[in-house]
Amino acid sequence: MAALALILSPRQQLKPPSVPTIGLDPAVATLINRTLDQVRLAPRSDAAWGKLGSVLLHYEFIEQGHEAFTQAAKFSPDQPRWPYLHALLLLNHDAAAAVLKLERAVALCDSTPDMPRLRLAQFLAEHGRDEEAEQHFNTLLRSQPGHAPALLGLARLLHIRGRLAESTNALHRCLDDRHTAKGAHALLAAIHRALGQTSEAEAAARRSSALPVDAPWPDPYWEEALVWRVGRKAMIENASVLMDQGRLEDALPVLSEVTREYPTDDEAWYLMGWTLNQLQRGEPAERALREHLRRSPQSPKGHAQLAVSLLAQKRFADAVQILESGLKLKPTWRELHSNLGYACVQLGREEEAIRHFRNALANDPNYPASYTALAELLARRGGQAEARLLLRQVLILDPSNGRAPLLLERLGPEPR
């Protein structure tokens, strides 16, 4: 028995860390407890410890996750995924330690997969270690000359150094890649501004604004860990990412699952209504937003979006009532005033509409649509002089605006 005890004692010393799960989302608590049990059953398995670290990574258990990834790397020292994921755990808490982990992952995998080196290069660039970052970007480009994030990263470094022509050359190679297009056009706008090329800068900035959020670069280790994001927060975050990318149809099933699994969650109902509004599905959007307001009756954004769904259904009087309730909650919100103006126009209540459009401009004097709406309304009522002034202001704010010149032309020549 003594010999058996000696054999077992080292194994018994490898116990998983204590993770408090009381008060967590039930789905998260269940996952963590099951993963802890797996470590207890296989205390010398890098996969068990690595899974535990990957789970804890998503729920801000930094100390326990650090212990788990340390053990995983101990039992599999040549495996790059554990130091890489360990670095992601530490990035916002211990930058120096995170860099060491990223460097270890790069040493183990070189550029296959490429994300550890790319993440290291981006981190170094963000922290002013430009020469080291450039070396890693160039390493990626030697093995993959069209590597879009590396091109964008290199272009940013060149821009900072004032090497604008070289930066532009790098940018032109990643302007059309969905992983970099938005960021690349934004940087291109900055370069044109620095060169005094105003019209080109404005065109690049408009293009950047119109593009969806840059898609994330493939990251196999992170994608493996993503399967352990569960519960309400994870689903909301997944839906939000899809919405940011303009993938609204893909976001709807995720939001439906949240509202089904967490029916008392007011934010999920709001996001569902917002998404349906964007897809111009007024009736289901109204149902979702009324559920949101039932659970959060003081929500200004809920009132604003419910009004949008009603306007889409041409229920203008109902929209006015909701918008007026929203203004009591947030009287300075331009969107509420502007939509009230639109609804009142549809109801023939032009004096009220003029007042609401003026209030919209008072709260946001940089929104061209409010100027054009008010100008059209004033022109219809004989206020051509003020309408011209408003439309000229539109062209100052947005020189490429296509509607303002047409409205000015319709007004005819200015009286002498």
Image: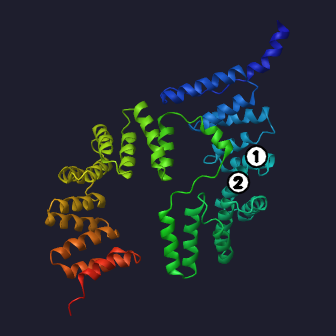
What is the secondary structure assignment of the residue under circle 2? helix
Q: Residue at x 60, y 23 (%)?
A: 34
Residue 108 image position (x, y, % from top left) = 80, 45
Quadrant where the image shows the C terminus = bottom left
- The amino acid type, in three-letter code, at marker 2 is Leu
Q: Determine whether the residue tagged by mark 1 lies in a helix, strand or loop.
A: helix
58 sits left or right of 130 in the view: left
Q: Which residue is mark 1?
A: 105
Residue 252 placement: quadrant = top left
For the residues marked 1 and 2, what is the alpha-carbon distance in whole angstroms? Answer: 10 Å
Mark 1 or mark 2, earlier in chain: 1
Q: Which residue is mark 2?
A: 120
Residue at 58 percent of width and 69 percent of height = 187
Vertical side of 301 occupied by 296: above or below = above
Q: Residue furthest right?
A: 3
Q: Quadrant of residue 339?
A: bottom left
Q: Which amino acid, by three-letter code, is at mark 1?
A: Ala
Nearer to the camera, 110 or 378: 378
- Whether the residues at callouts 1 and 2 have beta carbons within 8 Å, the answer is yes
Q: Circle 1: is it few (<14), some (14-19), or many (20+) Cα within 10 Å?
A: many
Q: Residue furthest bottom?
A: 416
Please state if 358 lies on the left or on the right of 113 as rendered: left
| Above or below, 166 relative to 249 | below
- Foreground: 89 or 6? 89
Q: As drawn, is 24 to the left or to the right of 105?
A: left
Query: Residue 155: image x %, image y %?
Result: 66, 68
Q: Which mark is residue 195?
A: none
Answer with the quarter of the image where residue 392 lies: bottom left
Image spot of residue 86 (x, y percent): 68, 41
